[in-house]
Image (cartoon, grey):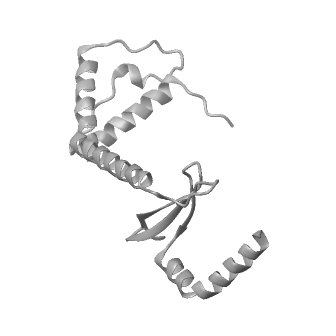
Amino acid sequence: KFLAFSPATSASASIGLRSFAAKAAGGEPAPASPSSSSSSSSAAPPQDSKKDKAQQGDTDEQASWLADWQVSQSVLDERDANKAKLTSNYEDRKKTAVSLGGPLDRKLYVAGLRNKDGTKREARLIWLDSEGHQQMSMSKKDFESIKARMKELDAEFVKYQKKLD
């Protein structure tokens, strides 16, 4: 079955919203206008009257009361400034990345990123490709693991160097 939209259902919906807003504001619901209570689907559009304008004023006051939970402009500006500052810091860190040289021009830098659950920040070593996109990141645990196995890695580097020659 399909739901049909008619002025009667529109009027009853707006009456329901008005009564909800009035109850939320602690007042009585605004009475429905006589033109909105008609049940025929071919009703003429409601005409603006003083009573309708007064009800519109009440609805505007109720809507502004309902909007009080919204964040103020100063808080939004502060959040935007914080985001801009973090972006600027990120760009500065990327600019100071150390190049590994060679034809691939990979770069490294250290950044304070959030851990997996997002509760703390931890230092991570970031590897960038030649286009500046993150290729790999290493945590403290990863770095210590590589450092502990450095003798094995040196042996692998020697094997690789022999294959290149």
Tell me residue 108's x, y (percent).
50, 62
Is residue 41 visible in the rendered image? The answer is yes
Q: Quadrant of residue 16?
A: top left
At 27% across and 31% down in the image, what residue appears?
59
Specify the quadrant that holds the N terminus.
top right
- Decide if residue 50 is on the left or right side of residue 48: left
- Decide if residue 112 is on the left or right side of residue 128: left
Residue 134 against residue 165 in the figure, above or below? above
Tell me residue 68's x, y (percent).
24, 43
Which of the two residues, 23 or 99, is positioned nearer the viewer here?
99
- Decide if residue 162 is on the left or right side of residue 127: right
Tell me residue 101's x, y (percent).
57, 58
Specify the quadrant that holds the C terminus.
bottom right
Give the mark count: 0
Q: Quadrant of residue 50?
A: top left
At 33% across and 23% down in the image, what residue appears?
33
Residue 67 against residue 147 in the figure, above or below? above
Tell me residue 159's x, y (percent).
73, 79
At 67% across and 77% down in the image, what residue appears?
157
Residue 145 against residue 135 in the figure, above or below? below
Is residue 71 visible in the rendered image? The answer is no
At 63% across and 82% down in the image, what residue appears?
154
Which of the two residues, 8 or 84, is positioned nearer the viewer here?
84
